[in-house]
Amino acid sequence: MSAVDLETCDREPIHLIGAVQPHGALVAVDRHSLVAEFASRNTAEFLGWAPEQILGRPLGDWIGRDNADKLPHLPLEPSTPELLKPWFIRFTGPDGAGIEAECLPHRNNSHIILEFLHREAVSAPVWEDEYLRRGYISELVKPGALDELAEASAKVIREVTGFDRVMIYRFAEDKHGEVIAEATNRPDSFLGLHYPASDIPDPARRHFLLNVMRSIPDINGTRVPIVSREGLGADAASAHPLDLTFCRLRAVAPVHVEYLNNMGVRASLSISLITNNQLWGLVACHHYSERQISSSRLRFAELVGGTTSALLQSIENTNQLRKSIEAEKTAFRIEQEARHGTALRQLVADWAPVLMELMDAQGMILVQGESVIRFGAVPEEALDLSPLRGLMSDGVATTSNLSSVIGMDETQMQAAAGAAMLELSGDGRDYLGFLRSQFEETIRWAGKPDKIETQTEDGVIRLSPRGSFALWREERRGHSRPFDQHDRDALRILRRALFALNSLEHERAALEAKNAAEAEELRLRHVLLDAARASSMGELASAIAHELNQPLSAIANFVNACRQELMNAGTAIPERAGRLMDEAVAETDRAGELVRRVRDFISRGDLNADLIDLNATIRQGVDLAVMASPLPRLKVTLKLDPDLPQVWADPVQIGQVVLNLSRNALTAMGGRDPQVLTVTSSREGDAIRVAVHDTGPGIPAERRRRLFEPFHASTSEGMGIGLSLCRSIVEAHGGRIWASCSDEGATLLFQLPMRRPRRGET
């Protein structure tokens, strides 16, 4: 056996080994001409024809033309996985003796490869009997759980093959294997032992997937070389190697020979267990002496293995389907609740127990931007799971050893040894994390799971299989139960629903933020516009006050001067005339004070408030408006509640409001009949309401929206600042003003609070 290089062991071309096991012979013929191009050196033992008598000659010359004519019509294409398809033939040897053989033919590349075995001298009706086959298969169909099926399969295959030990060997995701079932007559047991992934290199795994059966009757049997018609070898070192991928007689690789010898095994049989086109595990049969199995028993063992694979696939698919259905149901229910407007964080909180049970998690973390919400058993110190994105596949990342991805202390590892992360946003800021607590386990290895390196005399580093298979224990800490494919499928289902809900929530929030921003922008524009208009009104009010103060002062002076002139002339002033002169001077002073306060309010917002009798203020404002009214048929009705409490207000400014509203009402009734001005006051809860109603035409709809905005006149006369000023005064008192229109005229109302506004209130 040649040395095995440490770096190339996992790439060893075992399909180009160029030799067969000694319990059979091989001939490869050209697929078109059927001329023999390769033959193993032991053909004479099985065919009666030596290699030199076969090579270069057509197939019909040595197995008969009838047999040669049948060959192209046989099922020659290898299936995946390959199944036993024996061809039983008879032909005449070179000495004229009749020869019977069992042939396993298949086509590979440009060759048809024929493998020959001695035909059983006596048939084995026990293994061919339909009744017995059904009985054994029924034993396999009974179990519903995986472990029970594995145990039944190991028992049946041992009864069929007679091997000392039959094990069902399952591969984990990291490719290491565990014995989950065993049937043996040996005193020791391998049940529960783990074998490292390096025990079965990748080339061997590929062959196990392509070839269901691998029989080695004698591990130390002499390898029989294959030679070409030119007398050259057929291995990887030759110019034209022969591909033995689908050959049952392929010789045993040197590393495998050494491995089994180290275990004390002399014969082996393996049957691949394949589910969903993946190598799920192996049926590994060991015998501690040579063990040649008849073809009929091999075929039956193959049938049992195939049945076991089918049942395993059914169980695996059922488990996967059950978990996927549960995930789909949970996702659907969450989506249903989301339609009622429930926020994602509330949904996750409500469904946290169900989600954690589904994923066998003990804790959860929901991260939405800067918001972090925890559920269940979560480390006190927050964990940042974002580094898991390096393991992301389809929006899901899992690990059973979180400390290998992010830095963690011992306390954190207890609660979060493993984690799964669902990405919930395209920018990666939002995610849902599932945490699994530490799962302390003792793994029982069949020998220390390390490759053994040795150095030969010429300096080549050689990989040797483990020399000892004595029980070796490894304490694993910092790991959780692994997330398997079923878990990842369920996580993707949940992620699909939660990602969509989170995206919809972000879209709604963005739309609300946009609308709020637009509303705020509009409000600021109005504020700026109001400020500009208020500034203009302040300047206008100052100008008007300046212009009015002079004639008002002049009027007062002229009235006083008239009084003095009459007195100087010795003319007696009638009592009524003197009283009218006094009222004229007083009203002139009051008008000046009113102008001054309006100017100060418009320019600075000043209020000179006190507890006042609102009804008296209303009467005064209405009297001033009516005094200057030209309406000949005017009727004024005051419906003032005599029990109104005093209200905190500036009497001059509130009087100005009543005056403006009354003037507008009188103007609206010009040319109308009847002409009725109705002013009412009433108590409405903690406020006092004043209403000014006229019998005019009402307010046109196009003017209502901007009725109280400055420079939008409510009548055909004026500048449009009267009602805007009223609104400013009322709102400065903490009240509000509005209009109500009907077919019988218009009503303008304002409402003032009875209590004094607190500091900062408007």
Image (tube, rainbow, N blue to C red):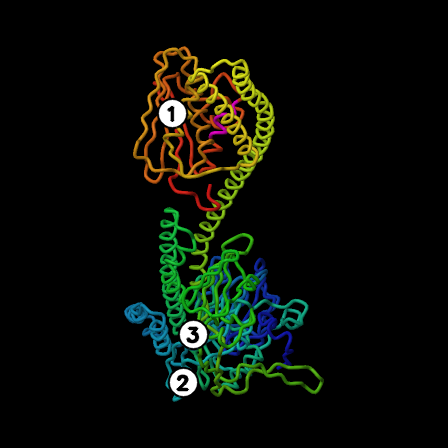
Q: Residue at x 47, y 33 (%)?
A: 729
Q: Which residue is mark 3?
A: 283
Badge 2 vs badge 1, beta-carbon distance below 8 Å:
no
Label ID, residue 692 = 1
- Report the magenta stretch's main SS: helix
Q: Which residue is mark 2?
A: 189
Q: Earlier in the sequence, mark 1 or mark 3?
A: 3
Amino acid type at circle 3 is Val
Mark 2 vs mark 1: give the one in front: 1
Label ID, residue 594 = none
Residue 66 visible here: no
Q: CA distance from mark 3 to mark 2?
A: 15 Å
Residue placed most toward the observer, 538 or 521: 538
Residue placed most toward the observer, 387 or 755: 755
310 in relation to 518, above or below: below
Badge 3 marks a residue whose secondary structure is: strand
Badge 1 vs badge 3, beta-carbon distance below 8 Å:
no
Amino acid type at circle 2 is Ser
Q: Badge 2: how crowded within 10 Å, few (<14), some, or many (20+)?
A: some
Residue 469 visible here: yes
Residue 650 coordinates in the image, percent (x, y): 45, 35
702 in relation to 517, above or below: above
- Residue 725 painted magenta: yes
- Specify start and end residues of the magenta stretch as a single range: 720-726
